[in-house]
Amino acid sequence: MRRLLGLRTAAAIALAALLLVPVPRAGAYYISPAQVDLDQILAPPPAPDSPQGRADLAAVLAAQTHRTPAETASVKADVQLSVFRFADVMGPGFTAERLPFAAEFFARTAADDEAAIEPAKRHFNRMRPFAVDFAVKPVVAAMTYGAYPSGHATFAYAAAILLAIMVPEKAAAIFARADRFAENRVIGGVHYPTDVEAGKIAGSVIDNVMLHDARFMADFARASAEVRRALGLGPLPH
Protein backbone atom coordinates (compact mmCIF):
# COMPACT_ATOMS: atom_id res chain seq x y z
CA MET A 1 0.00 0.00 0.00
CA ARG A 2 1.35 3.39 -0.96
CA ARG A 3 2.13 5.82 1.80
CA LEU A 4 3.75 9.22 2.03
CA LEU A 5 6.95 9.45 3.99
CA GLY A 6 6.52 10.59 7.57
CA LEU A 7 7.40 14.13 8.49
CA ARG A 8 10.61 13.12 10.23
CA THR A 9 11.79 11.09 7.24
CA ALA A 10 10.87 13.86 4.82
CA ALA A 11 12.71 16.40 6.94
CA ALA A 12 15.79 14.19 7.00
CA ILE A 13 15.73 13.82 3.23
CA ALA A 14 15.25 17.55 2.78
CA LEU A 15 18.22 18.25 5.04
CA ALA A 16 20.37 15.77 3.14
CA ALA A 17 19.27 17.35 -0.12
CA LEU A 18 20.40 20.76 1.04
CA LEU A 19 23.84 19.35 1.74
CA LEU A 20 23.98 17.82 -1.75
CA VAL A 21 22.99 20.95 -3.67
CA PRO A 22 25.89 21.86 -5.95
CA VAL A 23 27.50 25.27 -5.57
CA PRO A 24 26.62 27.42 -8.58
CA ARG A 25 29.49 28.32 -10.87
CA ALA A 26 31.05 31.74 -10.44
CA GLY A 27 30.42 32.79 -14.02
CA ALA A 28 28.32 32.05 -17.04
CA TYR A 29 29.04 32.43 -20.72
CA TYR A 30 26.21 34.47 -22.23
CA ILE A 31 23.96 35.43 -19.32
CA SER A 32 24.07 35.28 -15.54
CA PRO A 33 21.41 33.67 -13.31
CA ALA A 34 20.65 37.11 -11.87
CA GLN A 35 19.34 38.20 -15.29
CA VAL A 36 16.71 35.47 -15.17
CA ASP A 37 15.77 35.24 -11.47
CA LEU A 38 13.52 32.21 -11.91
CA ASP A 39 12.75 31.81 -8.20
CA GLN A 40 10.85 35.10 -8.48
CA ILE A 41 9.20 34.35 -11.83
CA LEU A 42 7.97 30.79 -11.30
CA ALA A 43 4.92 30.00 -9.21
CA PRO A 44 5.74 27.66 -6.31
CA PRO A 45 5.14 23.96 -6.93
CA PRO A 46 2.00 22.41 -5.42
CA ALA A 47 2.22 21.06 -1.90
CA PRO A 48 2.27 17.23 -1.76
CA ASP A 49 -1.03 17.08 0.15
CA SER A 50 -2.85 19.57 -2.11
CA PRO A 51 -5.25 18.41 -4.86
CA GLN A 52 -2.76 19.42 -7.55
CA GLY A 53 0.09 17.75 -5.68
CA ARG A 54 -1.87 14.50 -5.46
CA ALA A 55 -2.78 14.78 -9.15
CA ASP A 56 0.91 15.29 -9.96
CA LEU A 57 1.85 12.09 -8.13
CA ALA A 58 -1.05 10.19 -9.70
CA ALA A 59 0.19 11.20 -13.15
CA VAL A 60 3.66 9.84 -12.39
CA LEU A 61 2.22 6.56 -11.14
CA ALA A 62 -0.07 6.27 -14.17
CA ALA A 63 2.86 6.85 -16.52
CA GLN A 64 4.81 4.18 -14.65
CA THR A 65 1.95 1.68 -14.94
CA HIS A 66 1.77 2.12 -18.71
CA ARG A 67 5.52 2.46 -19.32
CA THR A 68 6.67 0.25 -22.19
CA PRO A 69 10.17 -1.16 -22.82
CA ALA A 70 10.51 1.23 -25.76
CA GLU A 71 9.61 4.18 -23.55
CA THR A 72 12.08 3.04 -20.91
CA ALA A 73 14.81 2.95 -23.56
CA SER A 74 13.83 6.44 -24.71
CA VAL A 75 13.87 7.75 -21.14
CA LYS A 76 17.37 6.39 -20.59
CA ALA A 77 18.68 7.78 -23.89
CA ASP A 78 17.28 11.24 -23.17
CA VAL A 79 19.18 11.51 -19.90
CA GLN A 80 21.95 13.00 -22.05
CA LEU A 81 21.66 16.79 -22.19
CA SER A 82 22.84 17.18 -25.76
CA VAL A 83 21.29 19.16 -28.59
CA PHE A 84 22.13 16.20 -30.80
CA ARG A 85 19.30 14.28 -29.18
CA PHE A 86 17.24 16.32 -31.67
CA ALA A 87 19.02 14.66 -34.61
CA ASP A 88 16.08 12.31 -35.13
CA VAL A 89 13.96 15.28 -36.25
CA MET A 90 16.68 17.59 -37.58
CA GLY A 91 18.07 15.12 -40.12
CA PRO A 92 21.24 13.11 -40.82
CA GLY A 93 23.41 16.21 -41.26
CA PHE A 94 22.80 17.26 -37.66
CA THR A 95 25.93 15.81 -36.05
CA ALA A 96 28.68 17.18 -33.83
CA GLU A 97 31.26 16.29 -36.48
CA ARG A 98 29.55 18.45 -39.10
CA LEU A 99 28.66 21.22 -36.69
CA PRO A 100 31.77 22.06 -34.64
CA PHE A 101 30.80 25.66 -33.87
CA ALA A 102 27.12 24.90 -33.25
CA ALA A 103 28.11 22.03 -30.95
CA GLU A 104 30.18 24.41 -28.83
CA PHE A 105 27.47 27.08 -28.99
CA PHE A 106 24.76 24.74 -27.73
CA ALA A 107 27.04 23.37 -25.03
CA ARG A 108 27.50 26.94 -23.78
CA THR A 109 23.78 27.66 -23.80
CA ALA A 110 23.06 24.39 -21.98
CA ALA A 111 25.59 25.34 -19.29
CA ASP A 112 23.92 28.74 -18.94
CA ASP A 113 20.52 27.01 -18.68
CA GLU A 114 21.82 24.86 -15.84
CA ALA A 115 23.34 27.84 -14.01
CA ALA A 116 20.08 29.79 -14.37
CA ILE A 117 17.82 27.11 -12.88
CA GLU A 118 20.03 26.06 -9.96
CA PRO A 119 18.96 28.99 -7.74
CA ALA A 120 15.30 28.09 -8.34
CA LYS A 121 15.95 24.43 -7.60
CA ARG A 122 17.54 25.41 -4.28
CA HIS A 123 14.80 27.93 -3.53
CA PHE A 124 11.87 25.55 -4.08
CA ASN A 125 13.77 22.40 -3.00
CA ARG A 126 10.99 20.11 -4.16
CA MET A 127 11.42 16.43 -3.43
CA ARG A 128 11.35 13.98 -6.32
CA PRO A 129 8.34 11.68 -6.77
CA PHE A 130 10.28 8.59 -5.69
CA ALA A 131 11.33 10.37 -2.48
CA VAL A 132 7.71 11.14 -1.64
CA ASP A 133 6.11 7.80 -2.51
CA PHE A 134 7.95 4.48 -2.44
CA ALA A 135 5.59 3.14 -5.11
CA VAL A 136 7.39 5.28 -7.70
CA LYS A 137 10.16 3.22 -9.29
CA PRO A 138 12.47 5.44 -11.36
CA VAL A 139 14.33 3.93 -14.30
CA VAL A 140 17.11 6.54 -14.29
CA ALA A 141 19.20 8.01 -11.51
CA ALA A 142 18.34 11.38 -9.98
CA MET A 143 19.08 13.35 -6.85
CA THR A 144 16.30 13.57 -4.28
CA TYR A 145 16.32 17.38 -4.21
CA GLY A 146 15.57 19.95 -6.89
CA ALA A 147 12.67 18.53 -8.86
CA TYR A 148 11.30 21.99 -9.67
CA PRO A 149 11.85 23.18 -12.33
CA SER A 150 12.97 20.21 -14.39
CA GLY A 151 16.45 20.81 -15.75
CA HIS A 152 15.89 18.42 -18.63
CA ALA A 153 12.65 20.16 -19.61
CA THR A 154 14.38 23.54 -19.35
CA PHE A 155 17.16 22.33 -21.62
CA ALA A 156 14.73 20.74 -24.08
CA TYR A 157 12.56 23.82 -24.55
CA ALA A 158 15.48 26.26 -24.55
CA ALA A 159 17.18 24.20 -27.25
CA ALA A 160 13.95 23.75 -29.20
CA ILE A 161 13.24 27.49 -29.31
CA LEU A 162 16.70 28.20 -30.73
CA LEU A 163 16.55 25.31 -33.20
CA ALA A 164 13.09 26.37 -34.39
CA ILE A 165 14.34 29.89 -35.06
CA MET A 166 17.32 28.48 -36.94
CA VAL A 167 15.24 26.00 -38.92
CA PRO A 168 11.61 27.18 -38.97
CA GLU A 169 10.87 24.57 -41.63
CA LYS A 170 11.11 21.93 -38.89
CA ALA A 171 9.59 23.91 -36.01
CA ALA A 172 6.61 21.63 -35.39
CA ALA A 173 8.77 18.49 -35.25
CA ILE A 174 11.36 20.22 -33.08
CA PHE A 175 8.82 21.25 -30.45
CA ALA A 176 7.20 17.81 -30.55
CA ARG A 177 10.62 16.32 -29.83
CA ALA A 178 11.10 18.74 -26.93
CA ASP A 179 7.74 17.60 -25.54
CA ARG A 180 8.84 13.97 -25.71
CA PHE A 181 12.23 14.77 -24.15
CA ALA A 182 10.53 16.51 -21.23
CA GLU A 183 7.72 13.97 -20.78
CA ASN A 184 10.34 11.23 -20.54
CA ARG A 185 11.23 12.66 -17.15
CA VAL A 186 7.70 11.95 -15.90
CA ILE A 187 7.63 8.53 -17.54
CA GLY A 188 10.99 7.79 -15.93
CA GLY A 189 9.65 8.61 -12.47
CA VAL A 190 12.02 11.46 -11.65
CA HIS A 191 9.77 14.49 -12.25
CA TYR A 192 6.17 15.60 -11.88
CA PRO A 193 4.18 17.14 -14.76
CA THR A 194 4.32 20.54 -13.03
CA ASP A 195 8.14 20.29 -12.95
CA VAL A 196 8.04 19.91 -16.72
CA GLU A 197 5.69 22.86 -17.16
CA ALA A 198 7.98 25.01 -15.01
CA GLY A 199 10.92 23.87 -17.14
CA LYS A 200 9.10 24.97 -20.28
CA ILE A 201 8.60 28.42 -18.77
CA ALA A 202 12.19 28.54 -17.55
CA GLY A 203 13.60 27.65 -20.96
CA SER A 204 11.47 30.31 -22.62
CA VAL A 205 12.51 32.99 -20.12
CA ILE A 206 16.20 32.09 -20.43
CA ASP A 207 16.07 32.23 -24.23
CA ASN A 208 14.27 35.56 -24.16
CA VAL A 209 17.15 37.05 -22.17
CA MET A 210 19.76 35.46 -24.45
CA LEU A 211 18.04 36.63 -27.62
CA HIS A 212 18.46 40.23 -26.42
CA ASP A 213 22.20 39.87 -25.87
CA ALA A 214 24.42 41.14 -28.70
CA ARG A 215 27.28 38.68 -28.11
CA PHE A 216 24.86 35.78 -27.99
CA MET A 217 23.17 36.90 -31.20
CA ALA A 218 26.49 37.07 -33.04
CA ASP A 219 27.25 33.46 -32.11
CA PHE A 220 23.65 32.44 -32.78
CA ALA A 221 23.87 33.78 -36.35
CA ARG A 222 27.10 31.86 -36.97
CA ALA A 223 25.69 28.64 -35.49
CA SER A 224 22.46 29.06 -37.45
CA ALA A 225 24.31 29.42 -40.74
CA GLU A 226 26.39 26.32 -39.97
CA VAL A 227 23.29 24.26 -39.09
CA ARG A 228 21.44 25.28 -42.25
CA ARG A 229 24.45 24.45 -44.45
CA ALA A 230 24.80 21.03 -42.81
CA LEU A 231 21.12 20.32 -43.45
CA GLY A 232 21.36 21.43 -47.08
CA LEU A 233 19.15 24.47 -46.52
CA GLY A 234 19.60 27.97 -47.91
CA PRO A 235 19.97 31.14 -45.83
CA LEU A 236 17.09 32.14 -43.62
CA PRO A 237 14.67 34.51 -45.37
CA HIS A 238 14.70 38.02 -43.94
Image (cartoon, rainbow, N blue to C red):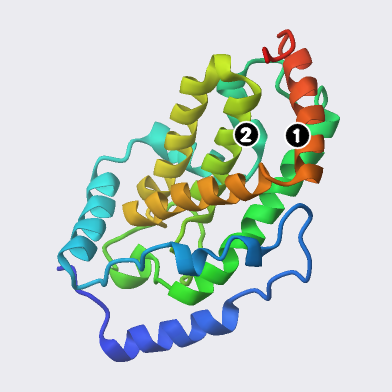
Residue 94, percent from left and from top: 70, 22
The residue closer to the viewer here, 85 or 225, is 225
The residue closer to the viewer here, 126 or 223, is 223
Residue type, label 1: Phe
Tell how many labels: 2
Residue at (61, 27) in percent of width and height: 165
The residue closer to the viewer here, 86 or 74, is 86
Horizontally, residue 123 falls left or right of residue 4, namely right
Give yes or no for contact between labels 1 and 2 (Cβ–Cβ under 8 Å).
yes
Nearest to N terminus: mark 1 or mark 2:
2
Crowding at mark 2 (Cα within 10 Å: few <14, some 14-19, many 20+) = many
- Visible residue check, residue 192: no
Residue at (57, 62) in percent of width and height: 117
Pointer 2 residue: 162
Image quarter (top left, top right, bottom left or bottom right) of the C terminus: top right
- Visible residue check, residue 133: yes
**CA separation in Å, label 1 and label 2:** 8 Å
Residue type, label 2: Leu
Label 2: state its secondary structure.
helix
Image quarter (top left, top right, bottom left or bottom right) of the N terminus: bottom left
Horizontally, residue 216 falls left or right of residue 61, namely right
Residue at (57, 84) in percent of width and height: 19
Q: Which quadrant would residue 36 be assigned to in this image?
A: bottom right
User: Residue 166, relative to residue 150: is it above or below?
Assistant: above
Pointer 1 residue: 220
Residue 119, percent from left and from top: 57, 71
Horizontally, residue 162 falls left or right of residue 27, namely left
Label 1: state its secondary structure.
helix
Residue 208, percent from left and from top: 59, 45
